[in-house]
Image (cartoon, helix red, strand yellow):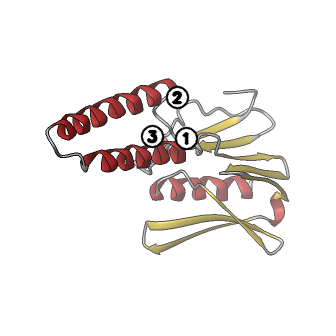
Amino acid sequence: MRGGHRVLSATNCRTRFQAMKQVGTEGIARNPAGTFAFHSRPRCSLTYTQECRFFWSLVVLSFGLAIGFAVMGFWLILPFAGLEIGLLAWALEALRSREGNFETLTIDGDAVVLEWRSRNQGGRREMNRQWVSVQCNCSTPGRNCRLCLRSHGRETEIGLYLSDEARLTLAATLRSRMQD
């Protein structure tokens, strides 16, 4: 229990979790006011220091091998080693840019507050619980699910960092919370 709120959390970059109970829902508790909070963010397993060590070890290995081949007369390998390291730096930077992404859904009485940050964009949407509908559309049964909250003609997608099963479980939880 955190601050008297009911908290569900999900932390994964990849959708490898199969059910909501696997994403940290053990600490759920109810408070008298019935507040519900769901927080989700990508799981980034490498710290900045670990990422730097990984990158520089590959730089030393790649250029060490490339220089060794260049000494033997295969000098054309050097530009490709540089290209390889450049692409690796770009990929690691793209992954690091996702560290600040999150989504938070709070239901407190009749107020439903959804906050999110994805890449450089963020937002906040407040809705009345009585007017919110939970939409969960799957292209095939239980697969490729899209979970949205709809109110006043606007639709906002949630559960971006969850697996399909976890989205279905969250949808059922939200439906029951909206009816309370």
Marking on residue 44: none
Q: Which mark is residue 22?
A: 3
- Local secondary structure at mark 3: helix
Task: Tell me how far mark 3 sits from mark 1, CA to CA.
Answer: 24 Å
Query: Residue flagged by tag 1: what amino acid is it?
Result: Arg
Q: Quadrant of the N terminus?
A: top right
Q: Can residue 171 be seen at all in this image of the molecule?
A: yes
Q: Nearer the viewer, mark 2 or mark 3?
A: 2
Q: Which residue is painted at 72% across and 50% down in the image? A: 116
Kind of residue at disc 2: Tyr
The residue indicated by pointer 2 is 48
Q: Residue at x 83, y 62 (%)?
A: 130
- Lateral position of residue 144 relative to residue 97, left or right: left
Disc 2 crowd, CA 10 A, few/some/many (<14, 14-19, 20+):
few
The x, y position of residue 31, in whole percent, is 74, 32
Task: Pinpoint residue 96: horizontal percent, then vertical percent.
Answer: 55, 40
Q: CA distance from mark 2 to mark 3?
A: 26 Å
Asked if residue 89 lies left or right of residue 117, the reply is left
- 85 vs 1: above or below: below
Residue in view at x 52 percent, y 28 percent: 48
Question: Looking at the image, which residue is at 51% across and 52% down?
Answer: 162
Residue 52 is situated, as x and y percent measured from the top left of the image, at: 46, 28
In front of the other: 116 or 79: 79
Q: Is residue 38 above or below residue 138?
A: above
The image quadrant that residue 53 belongs to is: top left
